Image (cartoon, rainbow, N blue to C red):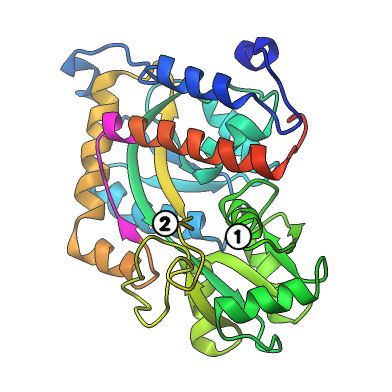
C-alpha cells in the first residue's frame, strides 16, 4: 500500500484524478510469473476457495455460486464459495491479496474493486499490484425500482418528486462506494436531486427494508431486485445500462427517460493473488470462459438479468483500468470520502 501513502495531490474525495489516471496507464497490472506450461500441469491439486466479498443473497454471491458449481466439474476439484463481507469488500479482498499465489484462493471481485482505488486514501492492499486479473465473468445493469407506495412510475416523475422532497427519499446499498451507491450519486448529479444514501452490510438487508417501506427506492443488481419486482413488492421504472435489458425489455433506460448520457452498472470478475503463475491464470481463464458460455449457465444467469462475458486476463485488465478512471470522476464530483480502510 506504499503507493497510497505517498501519492501527491490528495483531495477530500480521496486521490487526485490526474494521479489515478497516470497510475492506471502506467501499471501493466498483469503481474505474472512462472510462464511455463508445466506450472499448470498439476493444477488444481486441492479444492479451490472462491471468496465472495459480499454477504450471501446478493448478486455477487449468486454469480459466484452459479459459476462454482460447473467450474468444479471443469477443473476436477471442488470450488467452494466463501462469503467474507465487510468494509465495502475490503475484508475479502485483503484475504485474497495475502493468500498463497498458487491459484487455489480466488476472489469474485466487483465494480467496488475499481471504485475503492479512489474512495479510500489508504488500503491494506494495492489493487494494481497485489492482484492479477483472470476473467471478467459477467456484467449487469442496475434496476431503478421504487416501493409501490411511492407515487411514481417513470424517471421524470421520480425526479419531480425528489425535487419536491429534497433529502427525504432514502436508498440502500451494500456499503459506501458500491455500484448501487455510485449509480445513485451519478443520478443525483445528472438529475439535480438529493437522494439520501443508507449503507448496509449486505444488499439483501437493504432490500428487506425497502420492501417493508422504510426506504423509498433503490438502484439494485438484477439478481437481487428482479424477484421483488416480479412479485409486485417493488415497482421497476428503468434500467441503468446503455441499452434495455433482455430480461425486462419493457423497461426504458434512464438515459432514454430524459437523462442523456447516464449509464451505470455492476460487474463480476475473477482475480487471483499477484505472482500466480501465468499458466495457472490461463487455465482458470479458459475454465471460466467455457463455463459461462455453456448454454445452461448462460441461460441461468440471463434469467437473473446477468450478461455473461468470460474474456481473457488482458481484456479484463484493460476493463478494470477504464472502470477506475470512470468512477474516480464520479467520486471526485460527488465529494465522497469514505476515509481510511483498516
In reply to whether residue 190 is colored magenta, the answer given is: no
Using the image, tell me which numbered label, if any, was put on residue 69.
none
Q: Nearer the viewer, residue 126 or 194?
A: 194
What is the spatial separation of the Cα atoms under label 1 and label 2, in whole angstroms? Answer: 26 Å
**Considering the numbered disc 1 on the image, is that residue within a helix, a strand or a loop?**
helix
Label 2 CA crowd tier, 10 Å (few <14, some 14–19, many 20+):
many
Q: Is residue 224 above or below residue 63?
A: below
Which of the two marks, 1 or 2, is nearer to us in this view? 1
Q: Nearer the viewer, residue 195 or 190?
A: 190
Image x and y of residue 218, in percent: 63, 69
Label 1 CA crowd tier, 10 Å (few <14, some 14–19, many 20+):
many
Query: Dividing the picture into quarters, in which one does residue 35 lie?
Result: top left
- Location of mark 1 (residue): 187
Image x and y of residue 79, in percent: 38, 45
In reply to whether residue 315 is colored magenta, the answer given is: yes
Q: Nearer the viewer, residue 161 or 124?
A: 161
Q: Is residue 83 left or right of residue 160?
A: left
In magenta, the rendered stretch is 307-316
**Considering the numbered disc 2 on the image, is that residue within a helix, a strand or a loop?**
helix
Residue 128 visible at all:
no
Q: Is residue 33 left or right of residue 259?
A: left
Q: Earlier in the sequence, mark 1 or mark 2?
A: 2
Query: Dividing the picture into quarters, in which one does residue 297 lie?
Result: bottom left
Image x and y of residue 137, in percent: 34, 48
Residue that appears at 63% across and 24% down? 16
Query: Dividing the picture into quarters, in which one does residue 317 lie?
Result: top left
Q: Is residue 130 left or right of residue 35?
A: right
Using the image, tell me which numbered label, if any, was put on residue 63.
2
Q: Is residue 320 left or right of residue 159?
A: left
Residue that appears at 20% across and 55% down? 293
Quadrant of the drawing holding the C terminus: top right
Amino acid at each position: 500500500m506504499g503507493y497510497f501513502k505517498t501519492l501527491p495531490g490528495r483531495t477530500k474525495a480521496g486521490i487526485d484524478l490526474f494521479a489515478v489516471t497516470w497510475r492506471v496507464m502506467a501499471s501493466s497490472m498483469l503481474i505474472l510469473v512462472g510462464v511455463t506450461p508445466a506450472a499448470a500441469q498439476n493444477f488444481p491439486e486441492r479444492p479451490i476457495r472462491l471468496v465472495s466479498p459480499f454477504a450471501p443473497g446478493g448478486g455477487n454471491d449468486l454469480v459466484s455460486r452459479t459459476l462454482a458449481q460447473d467450474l468444479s466439474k471443469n477443473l476436477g476439484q471442488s470450488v467452494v464459495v466463501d462469503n467474507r463481507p465487510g468494509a465495502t469488500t475490503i475484508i475479502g479482498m485483503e484475504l485474497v491479496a495475502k493468500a498463497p499465489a498458487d491459484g487455489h484462493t480466488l476472489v469474485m471481485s466487483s465494480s467496488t474493486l475499481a471504485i475503492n482505488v479512489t474512495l479510500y486514501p489508504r488500503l491494506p492492499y494495492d489493487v494494481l499490484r497485489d492482484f492479477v486479473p483472470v476473467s471478467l465473468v459477467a456484467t449487469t445493469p442496475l434496476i431503478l425500482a421504487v416501493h409501490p407506495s411511492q407515487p411514481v412510475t417513470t424517471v421524470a416523475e421520480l425526479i419531480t418528486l425528489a425535487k419536491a422532497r429534497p433529502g427525504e427519499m432514502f436508498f440502500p446499498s451494500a456499503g459506501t462506494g458500491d455500484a448501487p451507491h455510485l449509480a445513485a450519486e451519478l443520478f443525483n448529479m445528472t438529475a439535480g436531486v438529493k437522494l439520501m444514501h443508507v449503507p448496509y452490510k449486505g444488499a439483501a438487508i437493504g432490500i428487506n427494508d425497502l420492501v417493508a417501506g422504510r426506504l423509498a427506492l433503490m438502484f439494485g443488481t438484477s439478481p437481487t431486485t428482479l424477484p421483488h419486482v416480479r412479485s409486485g413488492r417493488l415497482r421497476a421504472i428503468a434500467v441503468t445500462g446503455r441499452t434495455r435489458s433482455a430480461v425486462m425489455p419493457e423497461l426504458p433506460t434512464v438515459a432514454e427517460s430524459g437523462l442523456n448520457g447516464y449509464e451505470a452498472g455492476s460487474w463480476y470478475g475473477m482475480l487471483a493473488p499477484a505472482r500466480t503463475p501465468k499458466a495457472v491464470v490461463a487455465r482458470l481463464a479458459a475454465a471460466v470462459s467455457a463455463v459461462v458460455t455453456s448454454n445452461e449457465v448462460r441461460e441461468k444467469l440471463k434469467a437473473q438479468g446477468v450478461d455473461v462475458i468470460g474474456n481473457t486476463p488482458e481484456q479484463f485488465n484493460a476493463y478494470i483500468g477504464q472502470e477506475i478512471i470512470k468512477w474516480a470522476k464520479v467520486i471526485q464530483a460527488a465529494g465522497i470520502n469514505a476515509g481510511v480502510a483498516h
